[in-house]
Amino acid sequence: MSNRIFLSPPHMNGTETAFVLDAFASNWIAPLGPFVDRFEQELGGYLNRHVCALCSGTSALHLGLLTLGVGPGDRVYCSDFTFSASCNIIRYCGAEPVFIDSEADSWQMDPALLEQKLSEDEKLGKLPKAVIVVDLYGISADYARILPILDKYHIPLLEDSAEALGSKRDGKLCGTFGKVSGFSFNGNKIITTSGGGALISDDEAIVKRARYLATQAREPKPFYHHVTIGYNYRLSNLLAAVGCGQMQTLEQRIEARREIFDEYVRQLSDIDGIGFMPEPKGAVSNKWLTVITIDPKKIRKSPEDIRLALEAENIESRWAWKPMHMQPVYENAECVGGSVCENIFNKALCLPSGSSLQPNDQDHVCECLRKALTK
């Protein structure tokens, strides 16, 4: 697999090794330790928020809902166009999801549909307990429109910024719009802790509550004593050491991915029928993944046709997220709209976008892609 071009592989800078060896030397192998504290401080300093480092982005979102008081019988709105973790957490809490479609010009949650649904549900006396908005593929949702709507109905925002560390909207970093926010540091993210995540809030009490729940809800006694159900969700000191090394080059990783996106545009935009995920005015994306669209009226190829052609060249690509309302596990869930993100799904493909992608490898991807699209 050494010559395979991956979609978004981890990109180490070298300092991670020294930090991990430091953790070994100090014997801080078990969960928690000085590197967890350091990682929380560095990420918190970057975002100007309180941070609880966790074992995954999913655990961060789950705890986010719990700290917002979501429980059995509640309803939670969620972006329809997303990865399943964004809404699985709703079911973890015993609540029911309601999916909201995207805007065609941003691919993010449609504020007009959100407001329409809130107005309808207010009259029925069934407003949601929270709204989960996803910053999809590194693009921020339109919070200038969304937040006033949520404030009107006194509904808290859980911002799923798993894919958007370093992205901005109107000069403000993603992950700082929500009452609670979650990040992922999975191996394919812009920086990684191998497996890991973080819950973010400007409310210190929320982060303290999350930290308590994430550590098996153990009470401060000299023996194990529990008054509520907790979880084993904290990040290990070894993985936090990797994260501390990764934080040192975050801005360079963002710059590299943006340059990779720009190069795809330069090499492919002349092909009639090829488009790219839009970057709305005011948004500055980390370009976690470059996503192209294939117009079926101009190119008689499906995303699967192209994916298979690239796979034959040992190049990894991937369909865009399949909307949640199309998933069998959510076939009975309520959905507002759905046609916009369904249309995007049917014509979108994610290309190799890792910050370590070499120019000659990107040239090869473009060459193979052009051949697959035009033959």
Image: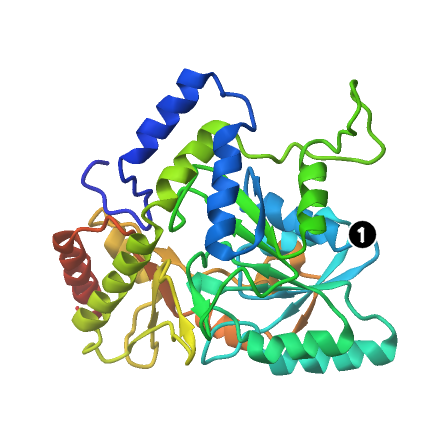
Q: Is residue 188 left or right of residue 298?
A: right
Q: Residue 260, how many percent across, how many down?
A: 24, 61
**Which of 172/268 is in front?**
172
Q: Quadrant of residue 105?
A: bottom left
> What x and y, as percent, mark residue 25?
40, 16
Q: The residue tagged with tag 1: helix, strand or loop?
A: loop
In the image, what residue type sits under mark 1? Gly
Colour scheme used in the picture?
rainbow
> Nearest the camera: 1 or 58?
58
User: Label 1 neighbourhood size at 10 Å, few (<14), some (14-19), many (20+)?
Assistant: some
Which quarter of the rendered picture does the N terminus lie within? Answer: top left
Disc 1: which residue = 71
In the picture provided, is 299 more to the left or to the right than 122? left
Percent of width and height locating residue 273: 28, 78
361 left or right, relative to 106: left
Residue 240 visible to the viewer: yes
Please tell me which residue is depicted at 67% across the width and 55% down the height of the picture: 203
Up-down relation of residue 262 to residue 210 (above or below): below
Q: In the current view of this chain or complex, which residue is farthest to the right?
A: 125
Residue at 24% x, 50% y is: 315
Q: Position of residue 26 (x, y in %)?
A: 44, 18
Residue 91 visible in the displayed image: no
User: Quarter holding the C terminus?
Assistant: bottom left
Q: Residue furthest left?
A: 360
The quadrant in which residue 154 appears is: bottom right
